[in-house]
Image (cartoon, rainbow, N blue to C red):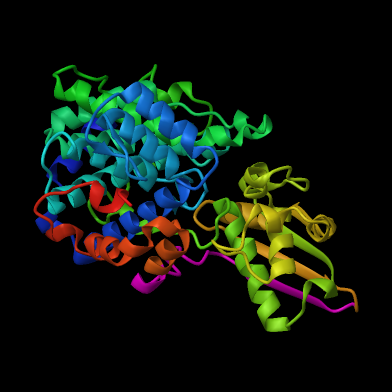
Amino acid sequence: MPSSLTARLAEYLDAVTFAALPPAVVEKTAFCLMDYTAAAWNGTTHRAWPAYRDMALKLGGGGSAALFGGQSTSPYWAGFANAACGHLTEVDDTHKRSSMHVGVVVFPAILAVSALRPLSGRQFVEAAVCGYEAAIRTGIGLGAEHASLYHSTGTAGTFGAAAAAAKALGLDAAGIASALGHAGTQAFALWQFLSDKALDAKAFHPARALQNGLNAAFLASAGISGPACVLEGERGLFARLRGTPAPEAMLENLGASSAISEVCFKCYPVCGQIHSPLDALREAMHKADFTAQDVASVTVETYGQAMRLADNPAPENMQAMRFSLQGCLAFMLLYGDVTFSNFTEEACFTPAMQEMLSRVRVEHSDAMEARFPAERPCRVRVELADGRRFSAERAFRRGDPEAPLSRAQMEAKLRQLAPAALAPRLDAVCAWIWELADHREISASAIADA
């Protein structure tokens, strides 16, 4: 009888060793941790953070596992809070083909385990690489349609958290397979919060995926076997979740390259489906040298997933603005750029912004649809009041592997996103992250305490 998908993936993850990882993969892991740290610290400034934090403190009781911002609780609830705060402001990493955020479920899982057993920097890297591998490959296996029906960070992300925790706990192939089996039983996340405008609830998806992943890994560690065919079985995820699963793609090129190498980093504090249009409009504005006052209309040609998540011509609050193509492009027209520092509620909700919003339209393009999800394609057309027309097209976003960021740019992102209280420690935090693999023992407080 052939091995199940989870067993084959688990066997590969069990064999992952730091010594065999290419230097580029080790460095990319540090980039991903830098990005997660920036997102988590920025999340502590969000208005919903106290609710997530206080819930974790109340339910977690005492404990030494660090929360971002300086407090501590049990590892299980620290993981919950640290996953939530990393996703609150929509600045965490993404992956194109699986359409998900990954670091926000992987790193809190490893940090939680590190509060229970000593982990070296090299073990941390191994666990992170395995977590990214499991999350991304599961997301791909669930199929291209899955992300339009479910929030992949909550579904595939559960597998990432489980794999990262299982590897950090030192489980063997059978244990990792059981953890993945338990993860599949718990994986679920619906997009209805967008329709109901309950956007603060989005961060609950990675937070719950994190806890579900920890549950899965610790169940496996306790000797409780998980379902072996939780993905492809007749009652498994592929059969029960709506969509078009691609099981053959899940193990494609397994071992030939690391999935973490495909991760993208955000250059704007908004939904990732909006980044290509922002890049295209930015390019057009720089080349043609026009201002908002010159613009008669802007039209964005894009693919269905971008429209489902971000076609919102009337955003009512800041969270909705982060998911509004029209709002984000209007902001760039009016202010010249969208940055981590200037994209504020005060700037977004002004009479000038409302007027500019009315000039931006979004259209579906079959040509763009055919290129998704391997690319994030778009075409932006600008018509000026004097009749001149300009257009710009993008296949990828700044921060994608095809347009990578430098170490200096990653540090700059952290410095822009970190609250003022962290400023005196930023040099030390950056140095600790870049030296990740050299640490004899990992301590969450090195990056989480102010």
Q: How many marks?
A: 0
Q: Give percent across and percent down for residue 407.
A: 34, 71
In the shown orientation, is residue 257 left or right of residue 206? left
Dominant secondary structure, magenta: loop
Q: Which residues are magenta?
A: 387-409
Residue 352 image offset from top left, x and y in percent: 82, 61
* Closer to the camera in the image, 1 or 214: 214
Q: Nearer the viewer, residue 65 or 247?
A: 65
**x 18%, y 40%: residue:** 114
| Between 343 and 184, the one nearer to me in the picture | 343
User: Is 402 contained in the magenta span?
Assistant: yes
Judge whether residue 84 can be spotted in this image. Answer: yes
Query: Is 375 covered by the magenta stretch?
Result: no
- In the image, is residue 442 above or below residue 105? below
Task: Please tell me which residue is depicted at 41% across the width and 51% down the height of the picture.
Answer: 41
Give left or right: position of 311 versus 57.
Answer: right
| Residue 268 position within the rendered picture, expressed as x and y whole percent measured from the top left | 55, 60
Q: Classify residue 230 by image quadrant.
A: top left
Residue nearest the observer in this picture, 47 or 10: 47
x then y, percent, for residue 30: 27, 59
Quarter assignment of residue 211 = top left
Q: Is residue 324 left or right of residue 29?
A: right
Looking at this rendering, what residue extends furthest in the right direction? 386
Residue at image coords 29%, 24%: 61
At 62% from the left and 44% from the top, the residue drawn is 319
Q: In this rendering, does residue 250 appear at all?
A: no
Tell me the quadrant of the picture where the N terminus can be found: top left
Residue 171, quarter of the rendered image: top left
